Amino acid sequence: MGANQLLSRMFHYQAWANEEMLAAIGGLDPERHAEERRLTLRLMNHCLVVNQIFAAHLQGIRHGYAADNTPGTPEPAELRREMAALDCWYRDYAAAITPAALAQSIPFAFTDGDDGYMTREEMLAHIVTHGGYHRGEVGRLLTQAAARQPLNAELPWDTYAVHLHRTEPARRLQGETQSA
């Protein structure tokens, strides 16, 4: 499996994991889970903003952000729409990029003004690992909220192995074919 094929699969996983996490956040009661809801939305919005910033770096365009989050906090439905669209962009980008382009280094500036320099492949890997880190934080907040008061959603199980086996159930057959 080549790097862009693996990255493409990782972005399919990220889209699935983001959708699962945002669905669970939607199960937080705005009154009973007010602080957890605010924090989880802020963390997922941070992921969206960072993903938008790096998408701009990859395209060689200005991103327009002065910080790694927005002043306001979007509602779950808006965040889901925006994140789904950007996840789709990353899936398509990773599937189409050539190995030579993946190796290309790109200079950029972080939102704090510090300079940075990463290959396209490193940027894509950063997006996947960065999102996983913050979804882990969100998962912890959801677990704590559920311990205090039941959620109106199932807690996500955000791992690549779970994603593969849920989206490709034939993997449970361990390479065996079903007999008729």
Image (cartoon, rainbow, N blue to C red):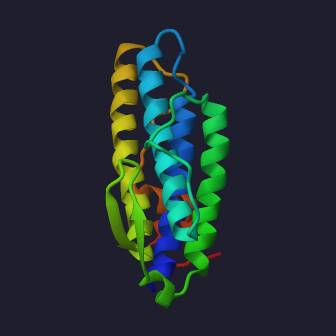
Residue at the (45%, 75%) spot, across then down: 120
- In front: 108, or 129? 108
Q: Residue furthest top?
A: 31
Residue 18's x, y, as percent?
Answer: 52, 47
Compared with residue 96, is residue 17 higher up or lower down, i.e. above or below?
above
Q: Residue furthest front?
A: 113
Res. 161 in view: no
Splitting the image into 4 quarters, where does residue 97 fall? bottom right
Residue 1's x, y, as percent?
Answer: 45, 85
Residue at the (55%, 61%) spot, across then down: 56
Residue 153's x, y, as percent?
Answer: 54, 29
Compared with residue 134, is residue 32 higher up or lower down, i.e. above or below?
above
| Count of numbered circles in the view | 0
Residue 42's x, y, as percent?
Answer: 46, 32
The quadrant in which the C terminus is found is bottom right
**Left/right of residue 42 with respect to residue 133 in the rendered view:** right
**Left/right of residue 144 with respect to residue 41 in the rendered view:** left
Residue at the (49%, 21%) spot, across then down: 151
Compared with residue 144, is residue 155 higher up or lower down, i.e. above or below?
below
- In front: 83, or 27? 83
Res. 60 in view: yes
